[in-house]
Amino acid sequence: MENEQTIISRRRFLRQFGAGVFTTAIASALPIPAWALPRGRSANPASVTESGPLDRYDFEIDYMPFVVHGQKQRVRATAINGTVPGPLVHLREGEHVKLYVTNRLMDTDHSSIHWHGILVPFAMDGVPGVNFKGIPPGRTYHYNYTLKQAGTYWYHSHSKFQEQTGMYGAMVIEPKGGDPIKAHRDYVVVLSDWTEDGPEAALRNITMDEGYYNFQQRTLFDFFRDAGKHGFDEVLADRLGFGEMRMSPVDFNSITGFEYTYLMNGHDPAANWTGIFNPGETVRLRVINASAMSTYDVRIPGLDLQVVMVDGKRVKPVGCDEFRIGVAETYDVLVRPREDKPYTIFAESQDRSGYARGTLSPRPGLEAEVPKLRPRPVRTLEDIGMGLMDDKYLGRKAEAKKMMMAKMEKMEAKWKPRTHALGSKAPGPIGPEPFKPDKHKVNVAMVVKMPRYRYHEPGVGLGEDGWKVLTYADLASAEAQPYPARVDREMTINITANMGRFMFSLDGKKYTEQPGPYLFQFRERLRLWMVNHTMMEHPMHLHGMWMQIENNHPHDSIPFKHTYLIKPGEKISMLITPIEKGDWAYHCHLLYHMEAGMFQVIRVA
Amino acid sequence: MLFVSFVVNTLTEIFQFIVNLMKFHVLTAPLVALLLTTSGGRAADYTIHPEDRDLTAPLPDGIYHSPPLPPPEGEPIRKYAEDGPGTGPENFGVSVIHDNRLKYYFRADRLEYRWNNDGDEKALWDVQGWIGGDYNKLWLESEGEWKRDKGVEAAQLEVFYARSIATFWDLRFGLRQDFEPKPERTFGVLSLQGLAPYFFETEFNIYVDDEARVSFNLEVEFDIRLSQRWVLQPRFETDLAVQEAREYDIGTGFTNVELGVRLRYEISRKFAPYIGVSWESAVGETANIIKSKGGDPGSTSFVAGIHFWF
């Protein structure tokens, strides 16, 4: 259709579209890759295991029209090999792989592909301006590296907003000695979001008016309803607390279902992506959140989920009915449907403004009931670590403040010797360094004085439905711990923002204001504290090395993460061993937050 | 509706064009650079590597320095890597993040027609716009009234340089020119503009005119959301003069109070027609001056208009 300027050889064609896709050239005209199409619409293998593995893929990035159900064509997709999502990259652990990426977006500065969660040498990481200079139009970049890991990963563009407009795809790496996770069916479930206005316009809209796409705001009548339910004083205290901070407790991801169409494997909810199973089989779903801004709560009504892998690393199998997946995280779940009937895979956006949906079905064309969206959750002052505000307006401030001051003094006493260089034995597990932004710092709208661990909390809007929701506390690694059980150094990073001006920052500094990169020492064992001083969740992603969450499991089984969804008012500690020298990106994976400055370079030296 | 969206789109295009022109024009580029100057740090001075190095070459040696590990006793934790003076992280000549964009904003806060209880009809405009970055902005504001059968009765234009001074506040310095009523008048302005606690959109201006007469102006607006698209907006404005200005019928003390309430319907967040009621009155000495001239110091108006931004 639109990509006929090049005649591609059959061999190259196969490389581009995955070896399993023995379809005609129709596949290249379709905006969705063959593997993501439901059965009945193409002759491709539905299962991941039938698509490879290969050791070489060729990507061609070009513009392509992409229309989702019920929308006008307003935004061009930046597609890889003519599909959104891009092709499924299926590789094998231990092999040296070649991934050749050609940029045909002739009007861009650069394009790039970042292999999310893959441990690669510095120059293969694919972040323009950090690891390399990007792929200029018309040029081909030769990514080649040896795979030192197996599991479910994904890839995406790291150039401006190309990821939002379709440059992402799944990456599956088969373990060397056979997969210890046994399943009859193996599907990739890529969740994403599609904007009709286009990313530049969307960014402008939410910058000028943070509630621009929020059509679930609280109204005057909600106030009276809440006051009737919870008592006038309590509700007024809550409103005054948020009013004083000039923040909205119902602002979740800035861009909502009003604007976004939520996609599953490139299918909008009406197109209904379908995975086939036979009753009694075990089905593995590799759920990847490739969204730009959307956090999902995923469940399959009628089926128990068994989480076996998180962020590409195996975990001790843990059962649940629902899990929250932050942007850029991956969760592999096993389900065992026994009945001969369809089941809905339901991925609700965090603010309940929409959903992505697909079906597991014994036969093509069946549909199960789609659950109703739950009511939009509301953050409380306690949720965002600002419980003291409540106390203030309810006249309990003096008491509460006294308690807090006492706690803070204790914390200060621990930190003072270190920060004032009075002689202490650094480092030690004494908690995150207290954060003191410059006074009236424009970047920082909120400072959480007493952050706390929230590993065991399911998150705002979850946990009250009477079913089990997965939490970070449930995760225990089932893979070997390659790093030593010691701590050489401690460091704190504060996550800060000013939503009103749409400025996002780390330690109160936008990327361009940072005095230089953060420093990690090569092969040290670093304990990194992260403290979230904003009222939103942020999926914090670290390139080039694992973050191991200290969630009270023994050191041998603390889980590996490449992206951690940090809750408001939360402090977390993670152990990191930098294993490659060079500059690495560290950022919030919400694309618009990253572009607004929540990004930093980490230098491993 | 189609027409309105056409107009808004066209205006947006024009502004975007101006922004682009400013970025690249020889004369305006320094202004843009000034507006995008950030608060501190080594703002955007990350070095551009002159050579187009082979992308897959091994890491250059010597650009990384390691600190001793663990930190010596008594030393604070070393968080930032240090390079030689003048060198930042290598960025290969491209910027990874664009967190220092040039932005623009134009808003017609009130663009309305007023029918007052004396039978007068007026049109009023109150528009603002800015161009700049997160910390520095160039503001333009205009406000005025056109009276039916009499023409333009009041027209003022303000130009500000605005600096973000706190999370929710900008401090603005500038000039105001009153083209009407005659004779024309020029003021120096110091202004605090922002969002006060509990979401009160506030503007407080201090004016000094060319005869060193000082006056104050306060404007407060508050949005009460009735539904996802219906918004009730009370509005309060008052002026206070320290010295009188007889040629403009202004006495000392509080001179004017305006209280209004407007109900708007947000067809989109960017475009909302509204209706409302506005009561205004000259007060104190100013009211006496107007009365002594046979005028009526107070009036109540029914208003209808549109609120939009792009």
Image (tube, coloured by chain):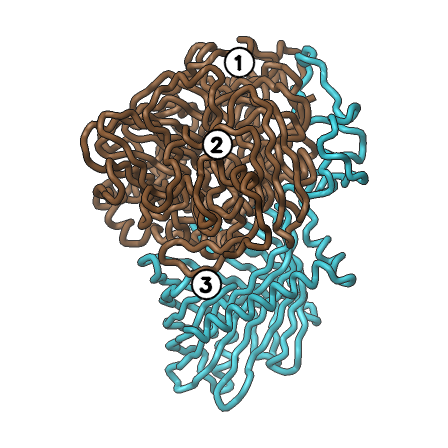
Chain colours: A brown, B cyan
Q: Which mark is residue B270?
A: 3
Image position, residue A410 (x, y; %) = 50, 17
The type of residue carrying mark 3 is Lys
Who's the residue at 71% across and 14% down the image? B68
Q: Is residue A130 left or right of residue A312?
A: right
Please, which residue is most extreme toward the front here? Answer: A10
Q: Nearer the viewer, residue B107 or B179?
A: B107
Q: Nearer the viewer, residue A194 or A37?
A: A37
Cα gap from disc 1 to disc 2, whole angstroms: 20 Å
Q: Nearer the viewer, residue A498 or A324?
A: A324
Comes first in the chain, label 1 or label 2: 1
Image position, residue A152 (x, y; %) = 45, 28
Q: Which residue is under mark 2? A: A448
State which quadrant residue A463 falls in.
top left
Who's the residue at 53% across and 28% down the image? A117
The type of residue carrying mark 1 is Pro
Q: Nearer the viewer, mark 1 or mark 2?
A: 1
Is residue A409 shown to the viewer in this render?
Answer: no
Check if mark 2 and mark 3 are on a common chain.
Answer: no
Locate the C terminus of chain A and report the quarter of the image it occupies. Answer: top right
Cα gap from disc 3 to disc 1, whole angstroms: 50 Å
Who's the residue at 38% across and 19% down the image? A181
Query: How packed is label 1: few (under 14 Cα within 10 Å), some, or many (20 or more)?
Result: few
Q: What chain does badge 2 belong to?
A: A
The type of residue carrying mark 2 is Val
Count all numbered tags in the image, as a single digit: 3
Task: Classify A574 as above or below A109.
Answer: above
Q: What chain does badge 1 belong to?
A: A
SS state under label 1: loop
Q: Which residue is under mark 1? A: A429
Is residue B270 shown to the viewer in this render?
Answer: yes
